[in-house]
Each structure stands twice: as structure tokens, then as C-alpha cells.
Amino acid sequence: MTETTKTHVILLACGSFNPITKGHIQMFERARDYLHKTGRFIVIGGIVSPVHDSYGKQGLVSSRHRLIMCQLAVQNSDWIRVDPWECYQDTWQTTCSVLEHHRDLMKRVTGCILSNVNTPSMTPVIGQPQHETPQPIYQNGNVPTKPTAAKILGKVGESLSRICCVRPPVERFTFVDENANLGTVMRYEEIELRILLLCGSDLLESFCIPGLWNEADMEVIVGDFGIVVVPRDAADTDRIMNHSSILRKYKNNIMVVKDDINHPMSVVSSTKSRLALQHGDGHVVDYLSQPVIDYILKSQLYINASG
């Protein structure tokens, strides 16, 4: 398959990220590597979407802190970014509504995908209020006119956004999204773009708990968008999917990462990270990146918290 015929993918991970761990970032990397190896996908972006403060989970620190920690965790990535939309809403948002928001945003910018900038000190968390005068969307002076979308393929509202764009005169140019994040953008011609939910097998298993998820939301998440699952602790994903009629129905929309890496829960677990911080356990460096640890200690987060 040529690059234009492969499905272009944005991986979206929702969660508390309380705090974000090395394992969360490794999930993105493992999922991207696996999808590329299939020969059918090109991953062009990753989005970390921390949950709203009103989620009500015990020990959940303010989204202000969680957004900063997430930004620190991805500051060296050239394809994963942090999005604050979920945190900035008036109340908690369902996973389904977050997916739909990003699908609609991708439609509005007609194929523009932001990558992380290389100078995090000059770049705030996406959406952080700025005092500067708002900049025009297209910043590069070499672009004479704003590129326009040639056409949008497929029905509006369908889960797979097939976007056809006119390529601008230059290959790369500076772009500022609606949340004032400065980054680099690429435009693609006649591509199929999908937003896939990235999760661990624990979230997949939660779909099988009666009454925990709205069934209509599950239909949209699994049936319309699709899921990429990174198994933890050698979880039996086939067994999990067989316990849910919706997961069985849309089994082809669930991609399970299969590689040789054993993914212990402790590497991903924010709970284990918090406990290590509270107990002064030196193994916290196995769970969290140093910039995140430094921020936690500076801000005195989790040290005396429980849960």
C-alpha cells in the first residue's frame, strides 16, 4: 500500500493521568509501532486528554497540575500532544463525547494535524490562556493564501472522516489551532483519517461490567471509532471480548497490540506511582519521568494523599 492509500490514524487516550506515567507514553509508542507493522496504517498523531476535575475520583489532583505533568511527559515527543478541552468543560465529559469533539475538530481544520513543538519552555499546554494578541491561523509568510479544502468525502457525522485537501505551496508551515498551541502541521491529499481510542486491557474489561458504560456510547466508541488495546499483564483479550455482545459485534474494530514486550501493570499504574511517592520509594523513577517527578516534588503533590 502507498502512503496515500493507508489509513491515517490519530491515537486518543483518555484518563485521569494522575499522574501520567512512563507506561502511558509507552502505550502510545507500542500502539504506533504495531499499527505501522501491519502495513495498513500510518499514525500521524497522538493525543493525551486528561479527565475533568469533577470526575470525582479519590485523590484526583487539579487538572492544572495534571495538564502540566502531561505536557512535561510528552515534551520530547514529536507526535504526541496534550489537549485540555476535556478539562476546560463545565463538567465531566464521557469518552464518547471526547472522541466526537476531536473528530469534529479534525473536520473543521480539514486534515491539519499538529505535532509537538521542540521548545516546550516557549510552548504552553494546549489551550493555556495567553496574554499575547491572537495570531492568524497560518503564520508562515511564504504561504500566500490560506489553503482551502477541496472536498470532504463521506457523510458528515460518520465515524471515519475521509478528508481531501489541497496541498499548500510549501510542505510544512506554522499552524496555531483553536487552543493557541504553536506547532507544525502537515496537510494530506485524499486520505482516510481515523481517530482511534487507545486504552489498556483494563478499560476493555470495564466494558463488560453491567451498567458501567452507556450501551449507546459503547456502540459509538467501538462501532464508529474503533479501539487499539495494549494488553497489560498478559491479559486474555479474546476472553474479555467474548463477555460482551457489543465487543463481539465489533470485534474487527478492536486492534490488540501483539508484540514481545511484557507490559506489567505497575509500569502504567498511576496508583503504584502515587504509593511510591508517599512511601519515598526510589522505584518511582521506574514509573515516572524525571521532569514529572521534579514537578510533583516542587508542588508537593501526592506526598500526603491517599488512594
Image: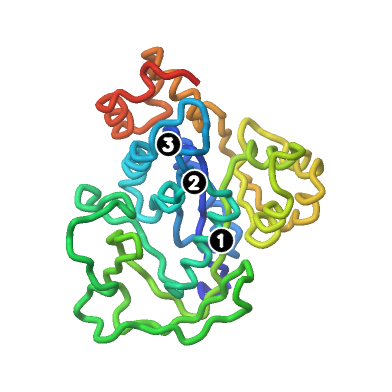
Q: State which quadrant residue 298 falls in.
A: top left
| Residue 207 to residue 34: above or below | above
- Gap between marks 2 and 1, in whole Å? 16 Å
The quadrant of the image that shows the N terminus is bottom right
Q: State which quadrant residue 53 falls in.
A: top left
Q: State the residue at coordinates (74%, 37%).
A: 209
Q: Which mark is residue 20?
A: 3
Q: Which mark is residue 119?
A: none
Q: Residue 100 carries which label?
A: 1
| Residue 269 to residue 156: above or below | above
> Pointers 2 and 1 in contact (CB under 8 A)?
no
Q: State which quadrant residue 173 falls in.
A: bottom left
Going by the numbered disc 2, the residue's amino acid type is Thr
The residue under label 2 is 91
Front residue of 32 and 55: 55
- Gap between marks 3 and 2, in whole Å? 21 Å
